[in-house]
Image (cartoon, helix red, strand yellow):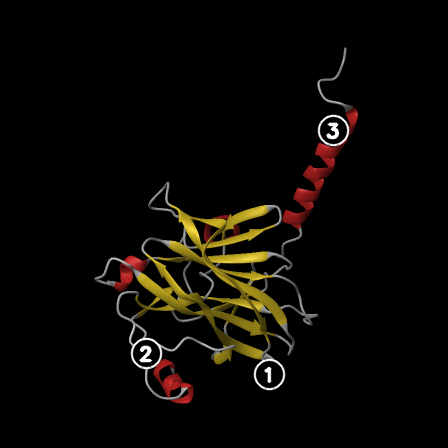
Amino acid sequence: MRHRYPLITVLLLVALSFVASASHAARPAAVAEPLQGTPQRVVVGTPQQMNVLCGLGVAAAPAYYIDYLLPPNDAYYTLLDPATCGCPGPNGVLLSNAHVLLNFPMACSIPVSVAVVAADLTDPLCPVPVPGQYLCAPVNYDLVPGAAGDYDFMFALPSGCCITEKAFLVVTFTGAGSCTTLPRLITTEGCNPCESYNVYPGGFDDLCVAVGFPGNPSMSVETACCDIVPALRGTWGQMKTHFR
């Protein structure tokens, strides 16, 4: 009796299944440790200067560290809902500066890519990110804290990025950089499903449901209305006082 598939094809499929399983199994367990300090703001690159209407994403008080990063191509997605900002015009909400909170056990540099992607709204109660369907093109940054500690990294998204429906902020850790001990995610207390996802080679997980995070990763975006975007006057040093 002839086999339906050639032996080489069967062996290849078996090998691929082992690779996918190994990739998934290699992820560290989501072990939470209580936050010890207060995150310090670090501005990366040149931020956009404008009046901030509201923040989208996860901006609640930080509560935990999670040792979970596994670069390269380790992407974290956070839901953005422009309806919560109440912009009256038809052009929606302008996304300006993104934030991600991280704990660095050591002083080192790690590369990231920051972007905004579309949401799959097939289930309106549980949006899902669509990796690669960019609404704001990826921008590359190196996160370089001056010392070990807790940090709120702030970096600009591409100018003119407006959204009118739900989307996802994505921060991708593209490599380990100079970090021999990887940074830890900082999360809130209490995890809301359908808001935070991790996409990596071999996996696509809701961090609350599939992984069991104690809270959503602290990732957010500053916004203004797309129709009217008055710029703040003064220097960047003066502007920073508005966000302390």
Q: Is residue 189 visible?
A: yes
The residue lying at 32 percent from left, 78 percent from top is 231
Q: Which mark is residue 146?
A: 1
Residue 86 sits in quarter = bottom left
Q: Is residue 85 left or right of residue 78?
A: left
Q: Where in the figure is residue 161, as x and y percent of width and height? A: 39, 62
- The secondary structure type at the circle numbered 1 is loop
Look at label 1 and name its amino acid. Answer: Gly
- Please identify, in this view, whether the residue under mark 3 or under mark 1 is nearer the observer: 3
The residue lying at 76 percent from left, 13 percent from top is 2
Q: Where in the figure is residue 137, as x and y percent of width and height? A: 49, 59
Q: Nearer the viewer, residue 130 or 229?
A: 229
Rounded to the nearest angstrom, the CA distance separating label 2 from label 1 is 30 Å
Residue 164 sits in quarter = bottom left
Q: Where in the figure is residue 179, as x and y percent of width and height? A: 67, 71
Q: Quadrant of the N terminus?
A: top right
Q: Residue furthest left?
A: 88
Look at label 3 and name its amino acid. Answer: Thr
Task: Please rate how many residues cluster around mark 1, counting C-alpha atoms within 10 Å: few if below 14, some from 14 to 19, many from 20.
Answer: few
Look at label 2 and name its amino acid. Answer: Ala
Q: Residue furthest top?
A: 1
50 in relation to 218, above or below: below
Q: Quadrant of the C terminus?
A: bottom left
Q: Which residue is mark 3?
A: 9
Q: Which mark is residue 228?
A: none
Q: Is residue 29 visible?
A: no
- Please identify, in this view, whether the residue under mark 2 or under mark 3 is nearer the observer: 2
26 in relation to 180, above or below: above
Q: Where in the figure is residue 102, as x and y percent of width and height? A: 53, 71
User: Which comes sooner in the sequence, label 2 or label 1?
Assistant: 1
- Please identify, in this view, whether the residue under mark 2 or under mark 1 is nearer the observer: 2
Q: Which residue is mark 2?
A: 231
